[in-house]
Image: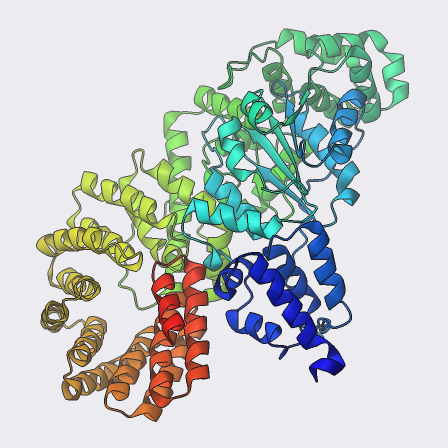
Amino acid sequence: MEDETGVGAWGRLFRAHRLRAGMSQEELARISGVSVRGIRMIENGRRRPRASTVKTLAESLRLSATDQRTLLEAAQPLARTEAAPTRGATVATATFVPRQLPPAIAGFVGRKAELKGLDNLLTADPVSTSVGVITGPAGVGKTTLAVHWAHHAAAQFPDGQIYIDLQGFSPAGKLTTPTEAVRAILDALGMAATRLPHSLTGQIGLYRSLVAGKRLLIVLDNARNAEQARPILPGGPECVTLVTSRDRLTGLIATEAASPVVLDVMTESEGHQLMAARIGPERTAAEPQAIAHIGALCSHLPLALAVIASRAALHPHIPLADSVIEIRSRERQLDALASGEPNTSLRTVFSWSYDQLTPRTARLFRLLALHPGPDLSIPAATALTGDPRPDVAAMLTELEHANLLVEDCDHRYHFHDLLHAYAFDLTMELDRDADRDAATRRLLDHYLHTTVTAERLLNPQRRLIELDPPFPGSLPSPLGDRAEALNWFTGEHRNLCAIIRRAADGHDRHTWQLAWAMNTYLGSGRWSDWIPMLETALAAAIRLGDQDAHNRIRHAVGNAHIRLGNADEARHHLTTALEQGHPRSQGNAHLALGFVAEQQGDLAEALTHADRALQLFRQVDELSGQAKALNAIGWYSARLGDFDRALRECHQAMALLRRLDDPFGEAETWDSIGFIHHHLSHLDEAVTSYQRALRLHTELGNTHQLAKVYLHLAETHQAMGTIPAARDDYREAISLLDKLGHPDAEPTRDRLRRL
């Protein structure tokens, strides 16, 4: 068969390239996302690879361009093509081609020398430079130039274009961290959050591996300094990166051989062209003196000119000379930015545009500055004002038309950072403290009550917290099912992190409750934000002196450390919770301490904790806790060899769990029952139990628990002598643990190697 198809020959060629690259099958699987089993079958000539898989593997091997081309050409006549999707279904391909550029600004004029300088990035020797830097003062049009050129050059980058706003000079301190930027790029490349390594170093390595050999354009807009941008640069010369900043980024120019384009204010001629493009050449020709005065008063800054031109276009019957009078009469100075650059005309331009708003829209504009996140939805804007949602949607449209707000494709809104600073100054000047406090309370309650609703949908068995009634006008978003809850968390993740940090400044009750309600979502694989968020909440609970809040968050922090393998940290937090809690929380603490004792190899102590937890849960008639404790007792008894007690306790747990309709608890208990049957040599029953656990955990999306069950199933298949099935189980477990960046991945690889 191999001689007829050539699949075997290509598999041997691919294996030779892999060995020359110095990669094991496991390492290649971890980088490429293709399973070890799939790689092995390709190399053995047992599988005809898909075209997208061939491309992914070739890029992951980090071969030279010539070797990649040779490998791809050899596979072309053999590779399977992806099947067309059936009607009504979607198919996720192995290769994502992001097209993330914002829309180009209509009527772009001038900047010929700067565009020519950027064009050099396309023709330069790829080993000399692949990074361009656009620097200049605020409002000078750095982003406009970058986006315009990116659209012009897009055809040169067939593997896609990625755009990230680093928010380096945000007045609210909304700096995009390298972790957030790399995560956004991995999202753009189609990498699921649960597959990301835990550390920033691992995420950067994965990102650079994914883009190696690709012809990709990456626009990093508004960097604060070289240190913020440098970790986000791709490793290979095939990608071109364009960075904009108010900082000169001399570090990138010196160490990365970045090609600088220094952008200054427009010339008088260019400013005239910009106004003519926006309001028409006839009108500019009719009032040349007014156009000249407008340009001078605005220092020929493109941002200021664009705002004035927009207003003039909306009011074609108002002479431009009136605009000159208005600008002069309202001339003030915007506060200096973090870089210390003066902006003598922007406040005037912004105030002139602001004054055209209706009073309600002007109030919304001011209050939007109180939102600390990177963007906001219509419901969040509605919460800030307390007005009816249709009215707020209309006001947001008014702000967008006035060039005071930008709407994204998914109906989310964000400020330009200078406009945010202006709006913040206005709300501090014009709105009463009580009005700002009420807007903040509505916003916090909107996020808190919606987050708690989402948490209940993700984890219905979790004991609820008592919330204060929502502040009038906060309008929490209704969520109908688990999918809606996950989508909401995904869309609001970064906003929620910012909201919690904002709440920690005087709103401690909201702080700990928001973090508590995010625990299930963050604990499902988004671990880099998990511990910092809980630590912020713990500090808030301590300041409040709320013992219940303290115990809940202590317990959550302890469980997070257990999940991450930090046994000593977990024991510290859980012991503190145990000493201070009431019987229910003490029972939960004992259960978690049992997991810690198990991690540290003391099964007798673990069983003691589980027995004590059961007593405490029975004392307060807590059925869900009793079921968890019975399962834990069964598990530890089995680990200690007392299989009769183990099976008896687990069956009691299962009876309770079915009464409670708790699929998560059932899945955990089926895993325990499978383990017991394995050690009683009831291997078929063990396999059946494990398969039930796998089905439930898969439906619930519990990645870490799935990995644990696959490990147990591998041991049973190994005991049955079905070694290929055991290998497959180990590989599935490794794949899941790698997605989580979990420390158990490497020991599991060792077990597979020994097998």
Residue at 24% x, 86% y: name it. Answer: 679
Along the viewing direction, whichever of 244 and 29 lies nearer the viewer: 29
Residue at 27% x, 88% y: name it. Answer: 677
The answer to whether residue 528 is above or below residue 342 is below
Residue at 45% x, 19% y: name it. Answer: 429
The answer to whether residue 433 is above or below residue 443 is above
Residue 420 position in % (x across, y down): 53, 27
Q: In this view, does 301 lie to the left or right of 740?
A: right
Along the viewing direction, whichever of 380 and 391 lies nearer the viewer: 380
Residue 182 position in % (x across, y down): 52, 44
- Is any atom of residue 604 visible in this view? yes
Quadrant in which the C terminus is drawn? bottom left
- Is any atom of residue 388 visible in this view? no
Along the viewing direction, whichever of 705 and 213 lies nearer the viewer: 213
Q: How was this image coloured?
A: rainbow
Q: Is residue 722 left or right of residue 14?
A: left
Residue 604 position in % (x across, y down): 10, 71
Along the viewing direction, whichever of 191 and 9 lies nearer the viewer: 9
Residue at 76% x, 35% y: name it. Answer: 122
The answer to whether residue 325 is above or below residue 234 is above
Q: Is residue 499 left or right of residue 41?
A: left
Q: In this view, does 675 lie to the left or right of 619?
A: right
Instruction: Specify the quadrant of the image occupied by residue 245.
Output: top right
